[in-house]
Image (spheres, rainbow, N blue to C red):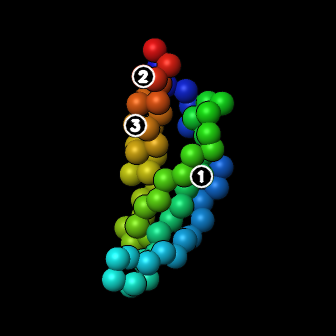
Amino acid sequence: MADPVNVLRVDEELSFDELGKPVEKMRVQFKVGVHGPFYRRYPKEGFSSAFVKGDLEQFARELATLKE
């Protein structure tokens, strides 16, 4: 079973693509049990808490396989 995911912080972040065009993203800082902090970045446009929650839970399940 995967450890619980604990979101620590959500920030807006501005980066640039390969053509130098600005890209707005959301940066999520989180821990999985005692491990972390980890960071995941998502496009700001269409940012959805349901999608992020599912993605972080999938990350936690994959991390748990390292401990088996």
Q: Residues within 10 Å of mark 1 (few under 14, many from 20)?
A: some
Asked if labels 3 and 2 touch by Cβ distance under 8 angstroms, the answer is no
The three-letter code of the residue at mark 3 reads Gln
The three-letter code of the residue at mark 2 reads Thr
**Distance between mark 1 and mark 3 Cα atoms:** 15 Å
Point out the frontmost of discs 2 and 3.
2
Give the mark, 2 or 3, whose residue is nearer the N terminus. 3
Q: Secondary structure at mark 3?
A: helix
**Distance between mark 2 and mark 3 Cα atoms:** 11 Å
Residue 40 visible (yes or no): yes
Q: Nearer the viewer, residue 25 or 48?
A: 25
Direction left: furthest residue: 19
Q: Residue at x 43, y 38 (%)?
A: 59
Q: Is residue 39 left or right of residue 48?
A: right
**What residue does disc 1 label?**
29
Q: Residues within 10 Å of mark 2 (few under 14, many from 20)?
A: few
Q: Which mark is residue 58?
A: 3
Q: Is residue 47 left or right of residue 13?
A: left
Give the mark, 1 or 3, whose residue is nearer the N terminus. 1
Q: Secondary structure at mark 2?
A: helix
